[in-house]
Amino acid sequence: DQFTSSTTLVSSPRTPGKKLTKGDPIITGIRLRPFLEREATIDDAPAVQIFENNVICTQNSRPQIFKFTNCFDASTTNKNVYDGMIRPAVLASLQGMYI
């Protein structure tokens, strides 16, 4: 199988005011939006799919794979996105961590 389990990057505490240096993890995230009503009626394969922490763009003849720290599908609520990605960063910054 060409897709394997991916390692999730996690943010680490940094000294306040410290600039990012090479090797510091960058947390990334993507959320697929739900189809609009008119889009849902079209019987076509989606151009983008999520597999674990990878987004697979299948629109071209050769699929392209993009890796993200957090991937949320179209059924994910705003609360789940916030709790899964934003909230930890807010709490870390309130504790004085440079994120």
Image: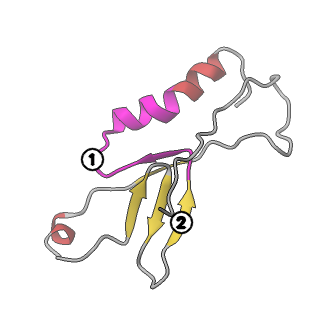
Query: The magenta stretch spans which residues?
Result: 68-87
Other-residue count near label 1 (Cα within 10 Å), few / some / many at <14 / 14–19 / ≥20: few
In the rendered structure, the answer to whether residue 15 lies left or right of residue 92 reads right
- Identify the residue at image location x=48%, y=75%: 63
Q: Contact, CB < 8 Å: mark 1 with mark 2?
A: no
- Identify the residue at image location x=45%, y=82%: 60
Reading the image, the residue beneath label 2 is 65
Asked if the stretch drawn in magenta spans residue 91, the answer is no
Marks 1 and 2, the one that precedes in the sequence: 2
Residue furthest front in the image: 1
Q: How is the image coloured?
A: secondary structure
Quarter of the view holding residue 21: top right
Q: Which label belongs to residue 2?
A: none
Q: Which label belongs to residue 75?
A: 1
Spot occupied by residue 35 in the image (x, y as percentages of width and height) = 25, 62
Instruction: Between residue 55 and residue 4, name the one nearer to us.
Output: 4
Q: Secondary structure at mark 2?
A: strand
Position of the C terminus, as image quadrant, is top right
Alpha-carbon distance for marks 1 and 2? 21 Å
